[in-house]
Image: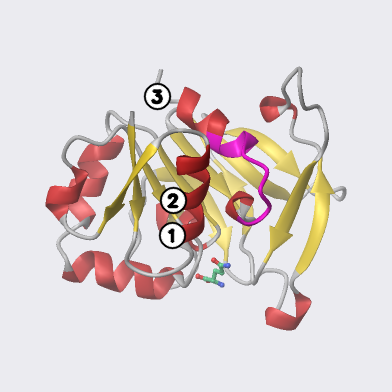
């Protein structure tokens, strides 16, 4: 299995590291030809405006949309924004997933926070612990379409992880905690 990680900007190296740790070869995607032959794509955290502009410049928008018609795609934080249908901002977006996000919903960098989340979908027999989630200028998933399954909420009910068929969005950064369960879960989405 070969998993692509969009490597235009942001914390793609952390995703690559986790994939390699669990025995999956990771391909850094910068150009359309890097998308050939991969089994899915992870879009990292970073700055969604920058990721979007670079994706347009390198001709990646349509090739990523085509990939998503058959393969799993996961966006973490900025990646979730890029994957979404609307963000209330005018910026290049893939518009693939039927969710609406609100950027920087928790405030500025200084308001970044960490918390433990209940995520039943990714709990395994060997590891039933809560997921430690890191929120860095994170978006909130403020609208989900009819086919979208909510995977995690904050205690007050606000949505921070969701799945629509082969598409996955997390407001937080599973790539920053050393917990590989979200990555393992994503790998099962292609099957
Ligand atoms: N605030 C960033 C954005 O709006 C996302 C931050 C992140 O990916 N950690 O794109």
Q: Position of residue 148 (x, y in %)?
A: 55, 33
Q: Quadrant of ligand 1?
A: bottom right
Q: Which residue is mark 2?
A: 16
Question: Is 77 or 126 nearer to us in this picture?
Answer: 126
Q: Position of residue 139 (x, y in %)?
A: 61, 63
Image position of 149 with respect to 43: above or below: above
Tell me which corner region of the image, top left, top right, bottom left or bottom right, holds residue 48.
bottom left
Label 3 Cα crowd, 10 Å radius (few <14 / some 14-19 / many 20+): some
In which quadrant is the N terminus drawn? top left
SS for tag 3?
A: loop
Instruction: Say which residue appears at 26% left-offset and 71% top-offset.
Output: 54
Q: Which residue is mark 3?
A: 190
Instruction: State the residue at coordinates (50%, 39%).
Output: 168
Q: Helix, strand or loop at disc 2?
A: helix
Is residue 146 in sight in this rendering?
A: no
Q: How many marks?
A: 3
Residue span colored magenta? 176-183
- Horizontal relation, residue 113 to residue 191: left or right: right
In three-dimensional space, the C-alpha distance between marks 1 and 3, rounded to whole angstroms, equals 20 Å
Measured as percent of width and height from the top left, residue 92 is found at: 32, 67
Instruction: State the SS at label 1.
Output: helix
Q: Earlier in the sequence, mark 2 or mark 3?
A: 2
Query: Based on the displayed image, in which of its 4 quarters is residue 68 positioned?
Result: top left
Given this view, does label 2 or label 3 mark the residue nearer the observer? 2
Please identify, in this view, whether the residue under mark 1 or under mark 3 is nearer the observer.
Answer: 1
In the rendered image, which residue does mark 1 sit on?
Answer: 12
- Asked if the stretch drawn in magenta spans residue 177, the answer is yes
Callout 3: CB less than 8 Å from ligand 1: no
**Quick check: 116 above or below 146?**
below
Cα separation, mark 1 vs mark 2, equals 6 Å
Which residue is at 34% across, 61% downward?
7
Quadrant placement of the C terminus: top left
């Amino acid at each position: 299995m070969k998993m692509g990680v969009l490597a235009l900007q942001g914390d793609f190296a952390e995703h690559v590291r986790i994939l390699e740790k669990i025995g999956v070869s990771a391909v850094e995607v910068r150009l359309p030809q890097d998308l050939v032959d991969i089994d899915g794509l992870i879009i990292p955290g970073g700055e969604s405006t920058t990721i979007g502009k670079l994706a347009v410049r390198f001709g990646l928008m349509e090739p990523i949309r085509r990939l998503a018609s058959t393969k799993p795609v996961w966006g973490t934080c900025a990646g979730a924004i890029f994957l979404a249908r609307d963000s209330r901002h005018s910026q290049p977006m893939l518009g693939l997933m039927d969710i609406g996000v609100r950027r920087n919903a928790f405030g500025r960098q200084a308001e970044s926070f960490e918390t433990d989340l209940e995520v039943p979908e990714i709990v395994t027999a060997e590891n039933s612990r809560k997921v430690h989630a890191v929120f860095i200028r994170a978006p909130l998933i403020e609208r989900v379409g009819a086919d979208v399954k909510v995977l995690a909420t904050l205690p007050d009910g606000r949505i921070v992880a969701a799945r629509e068929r082969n598409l996955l969005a997390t407001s937080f950064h599973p790539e920053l905690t050393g917990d590989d369960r979200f990555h393992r879960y994503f790998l099962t989405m292609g099957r």
